[in-house]
Amino acid sequence: MESPRVVSGWRWRLAWILGWCVFWATNASGAAPAPVRLPNVVLIFCDDLGWGDVGCFGAKGIRTPNIDSMARRGTKFTSFHVAQAVCSASRAALLTGCYPNRLGIHGALGPNQKIGLHPEEMTIAEVLKTRGYATAMFGKWHLGRPAELLPIRQGFDEYFGLPYSNDMWPRHPSAQTGTYPPLPLIDGDRVVEEMPDQSRLTQRYTERAVDFIGRSAGKPFFLYLAHSMPHVPIFASERFAGRSKRGLFGDVIEELDWSVGEVLKALRRHGLEDNTLVLFTSDNGPWLSYGHHAGGAGPFREGKGTSFEGGIRVPCVMQWPGRIPEGRVCDTPLMTIDVLPTLAGLAGAALPPRKIDGMDVWPILRGVPGATNPHPAYFTYYNQGDLIAVTSGDWKLFLPHVSQTLAGGSGGTNGAPARYRALRVGLELYNLRQDPGETRDLAAEEPEVLSRMLLLAEEARLDLGDARTRRVGSGVREPGRVP
Ligand code: MG
């Protein structure tokens, strides 16, 4: 028989061993979870850069090695669209995931307008801030000039740039004297310069972007770099002037490519490349009336200000090593309205409480085999809310409207625009896969497709309205308004 002292020592040793077992088991099984590493997002948005203005999209005489490297190390999206082929409306859609019609933002806002993106709308920056992101925007805003509507009131921690288009200034080539006030350059919500030297804009935005990346390396961040170039009037810095084979326009694009390179270098330098999604695209197609001061839409018809593919289809590349396939070309149709819900999904953030139109398309970006677009259709509006085009699968329907064209004529010279002619577009149907240049109207040959597309148009009118048919949509909201 054991003595009481021996029994007590044996029990104590057993308890000690069991305690250690429990401790190791709980730690080894992950009872203390590793913190989730949220991805950084860099969204580079050019202004009026056409589908055909980038090397990897077929540009001739313009070198874009850094954007091309993104296509090699990531995926090139050849059927990426904006929601409307003009600045403010396109930006509203990108930042909120809504069709511009839903937000009441049409066309391009003027410097003296008292409206803009309603502060109650949630931008990508606000969505990501709910997950602790640092946010910054450098470049062109164009979603409301009043201080109450500027980026720092819409989810961005910091802002530096032009509040609207760089041609809305007293040197506009065709506007009447007095139309535009001196062009302001804004830091936060303060005008820090008037009539800044535009040849330095690309460089200054880039410096701020690189600095922000360096300062944010310890936490997740969202950087929105919205270049003013190559919107007219185009400018390149001294270092890039005369460098390309395509004159000033080519120089401007090569400087934008340099900017992309600086951003990529900064990510690499801070060890952030593998955890950062970089998306490069444009707000609409080329402004063709400006001739050699504008780019080109590659194989597509027309350009900015129209709902032909040349206006709404933009070059797009995305890289995220290990997450987005390398060297892939994806021709699945996508639209900028899908960016917000996709990023929200990646960051584990809730979607905005107000209805949005975009959908999470991460499986397409990720290259999941068989992934298809979840939208029944995409809708393109223009002017003050006219429904112009419906795209569904390979098909695109145009509703009768008046568009613009140079009718084969060349654009203007030396920064002055040529006049567009009116182009009457009827009820027309195109198969974009077989006829991406939209040359052969199949409306008469495909009555079943036509009626299916007309039904989709009617559904959009019920929800989003249509100024032309005087249909008031049930889901249309007011823009932000300052008295
Ligand atoms: Mg634009």
Image (spheres, rainbow, N blue to C red):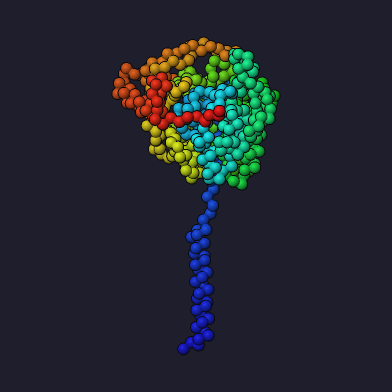
Q: In front: 341, or 81?
A: 341
Residue 304 appears anywhere in the view: yes
Q: Quadrant of residue 154?
A: top right
Point 54% across, 38% down: residue: 125
Point 52% across, 69% down: residue: 20
Quadrant of the image containing the C terminus: top right
Give coordinates of residue 211: x percent, y percent. Answer: 66, 38
399 relative position to 352: left or right: left
Q: Is residue 4 above or below residue 63?
A: below
Q: Is residue 220 above or below residue 178?
A: below
Give coordinates of residue 149: x percent, y percent. Answer: 57, 32
Point 62% across, 43% down: residue: 216
Give coordinates of residue 278: x percent, y percent. Answer: 55, 37
Q: How many marks?
A: 0
Q: In front: 251, or 177?
A: 177
132 relative position to 443: left or right: right
450 relative position to 27: left or right: left
Q: Quadrant of residue 214?
A: top right
Q: Quadrant of residue 189?
A: top right
Q: In front: 321, or 164?
A: 164
Point 51% across, 40% down: residue: 127
